[in-house]
Image (spheres, grey):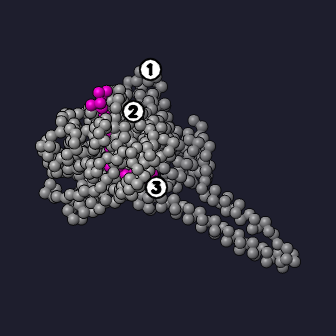
Amino acid sequence: MFPKKHSFSYSYLVVGIPVGWSDCHGSLLSADAPKKRGWFHVDPADFLARGDGHLGLRGKLDAYLESQDVTPSDYPYAYLVTAPRFLGYSFNPVSFWYLYSGQKKLQAMILEVNNTFDERRMYFLTAASVVEEDKEQLQEAGKEEAVEDIGIPRKIFTNQWKKDFHVSPFNSRDGSYKLVAHDPAPFDTSDALSVNNTIILQSSQGHKKLVARVFSTDPAVNPLNATTISKATLIIRWGWVGFVTFPRIIREAWKLYFKQSLEVFFRPEVSQGSISRHATEIEKTLEPFFFEYLRHVVDNTSLSISLTYRPAPGTGTHSKVILRSPSASDQADVECDFDVLSPAFYSRFVHYAHTSEALDREFLCTDAKNRTISISKPESLAKLFAARRQAPHTALKQHISLPTRVRWQVLQRLRCAAAEQAYPAAIETELDSNVVAKDIRQLPLSDLDTFVLQHSPQASIYRRQVTSLFLAQRFALGFVGLISWVEVLGKIGLVIGIMLLFKDQNDAVQTLDKSDHNGLSHPFHSSIVATWALHLISLAKGSEAGYMVPG
């Protein structure tokens, strides 16, 4: 790969704001939650941990620093350089957080990296060195251009760290990054603010693979001093840039793949410390069912265990929950962490009929790049699920009505394997290529299915969501949206069919009435068409809401 050379440069708009500032300057730039938004806006919800925009940029920064065991008061001043939202849209590959001491000296940085898969990784970096600007040092670090004369001396921040986040399909997660960043000098009063950062990607063998540079080409614009004409010019020149960032990435990827023939690395699941993509609506729906199932298992075990559960970001109403078994109320014999790395875990978990198999395939017996969960003590968790007390399936059937039983039997028969993972497990790579492995088991209702039937008043919601997942996996290449459209079209066809059926019957009745009763008809036939249609749709949809099984 290293002999392959490819370079490009694009215009890009970034803004720099003091962290903690919440206002709108001249209708051009705003941040946090002002009463009025500017053309360009920095929304706190877009940065660091998902959501929590109400905390503001400073509140979110402090929360992140505390999660890294860093005291926020060590960095009372901070400056953010990022791509703003324009007309509500933003695509932000990287944001730079500059952290300053009480003496306003640059001491640390946060690099917030976003990939095109809606995943995020923050790197907290303390200064390996902060020195005066030196052109020879910068050129040695990888810059091919001369350093611009910006009129005032700049401090240079450097650091090197291990790469553990998937950014490009043409690079693996191996290797390391090196950062050479100029202090933008936000506290300087000469209006000479500028950005000049270089990120170097090195392979695990130390080869330089990629040099990316973000630097100022035009003088900074102060929104307080901008005239109406200069504001209009800025909006016209730069407002469109954010909309073409992603198409530009696709264009360069096309060149690298088709012209340079670079090797492609499939997207791995995020590693611990990264933030996964946003959860789908189905995954958000399934998370509470899984959490209640997990809590039920812990509450009904004889083991002395304390389980710390962390859901995938954006799925649960809680960031961390500590579950204790009855025998561990004072002191637990075993303490275990259960972290969900990706919301995909919830939609994959329902495919497994046995919890032990799910834990094996999503964590223990799969490539590390496929893992959707992380378990600190998997052997203890395996004992926990093996020791659970649960009503047998045969006992449940005695309390289920016939329509409900049919719907759950359909779900049981539709159950299939989850989508194939990107990286094969070691045991799969050892199989003869001529050997085809096929699961011939007749799968029962899963452990989670049984729990939901036994304890949840929202069993019908769970059943419909899981059935949609199975149908999508079997017949729609995993696209649940296609199944939803088919369902909508089916309901429309059902209504039309019922209306046509009743129309024909009504016409026949009217003809009969005209011949037998001198033209008197029965108008109630046409009036009940809609009622019957809605009734039949509700029967087709089904409901087990409020269903509970004793025990």
Alpha-carbon span between mark 1 and mark 3: 43 Å
Q: Position of residue 356 (x, y in %)?
A: 39, 41
Q: Amino acid at mark 2?
A: Ala
- Distance from disc 2 to disc 1, alpha carbons, whole Å, reads 30 Å
Question: Residue 37, percent across and down?
Answer: 47, 46
Q: Residues within 10 Å of mark 3 (few under 14, many from 20)?
A: many
Mark positioned earlier in the residue sequence (1 or 3): 1
**Numbered badge on residue 470:** 3
| Numbered tag placed on residue 250 in the rendering | none
Residue appearing at x 38%, y 53% in the figure: 230
Return the x and y of residue 192 as percentages of the image width and height: 28, 42
Residue at horizontal 22 percent and vertical 44 percent from the top: 150
Label 2 vs 1, first from the N-terminus:
2
In the picture, which quadrant includes the N terminus?
bottom left
Q: Which segment is the magenta one? A: 87-105
Q: Main secondary structure of the magenta part?
A: loop
Q: Residues within 10 Å of mark 1 (few under 14, many from 20)?
A: few
| Residue located beneath label 2 in the image | 63
Q: Position of residue 6 (x, y in %)?
A: 19, 58
Which marked residue is nearer to the observer: mark 3 or mark 2? 2
| Residue 419 visible | no
In-front residue for pair 313/183? 183
Under tag 3, what secondary structure?
Answer: helix
Residue toward you, 244 or 407: 244
